[in-house]
Image (cartoon, helix red, strand yellow):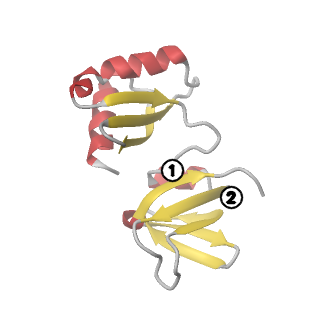
Amino acid sequence: MSAIQADIEARLAKAEPDVEVLLAEVVGAGTLRVFIDDPNGVSLALCERVTHALAPLRETYTIEVSSPGSERPLSKPAHFRRYLGRRARVRTRAPLHGLDRSSVTGELVGASDDEVTVAAPDGVVAIAYTDIKRSNLVEGV
């Protein structure tokens, strides 16, 4: 988890305790993109409340708050465990050991506290969370 995501989670724990921060990332030149989830669903009103709770960060960033959609990001071990059996795309910071690529798409078949295991068409791959750049669920077969 990034430092900015940890900061946002701490801020929202007080203001919106039911909101789960799925992913917070800085994109482009100063845009902070935050994907959230809530047991009651994500509404425009909730996105507005979260944006308001993050007001101190608006001095540094343009803030975009939204729901995750069907290709929700996965950024914590609990996210991977929740979606075992579903398809995901995992992109790593560097090429995977033994492979010449830095992206794997396949079924999530395991998720420990240290790594996620993906059954890809060309084999099963274990990837340490520290090596993951970005990951998300994917639709389709």
Residue found at x 45% / y 51% = 75
**Around disc 1, counting alpha carbons within 10 Å, would you say few (fewer than 14), some (14 to 19), or many (20 or more)?**
many
Question: 66 or 125: which is nearer to us?
Answer: 66
The quadrant in which residue 114 appears is bottom left
Say whether residue 140 is left or right of residue 19: right
Q: Which residue is mark 1?
A: 74
Q: Which residue is mark 2?
A: 85
The quadrant in which residue 63 appears is top left
Residue type indicated by callout 1: Leu
- SS class of the residue under badge 2? loop
Closer to us: mark 2 or mark 1? 1
User: Residue 72 appears at what percent x and percent y?
Assistant: 57, 43
Residue lying at the far top of the rendered structure: 45
Question: 58 or 126: which is nearer to us?
Answer: 58
The quadrant in which residue 58 appears is top left
Residue type indicated by callout 2: Gly
* Mark earlier in primary sequence (2, 1): 1
User: What numbered label is drawn on residue 38?
Assistant: none
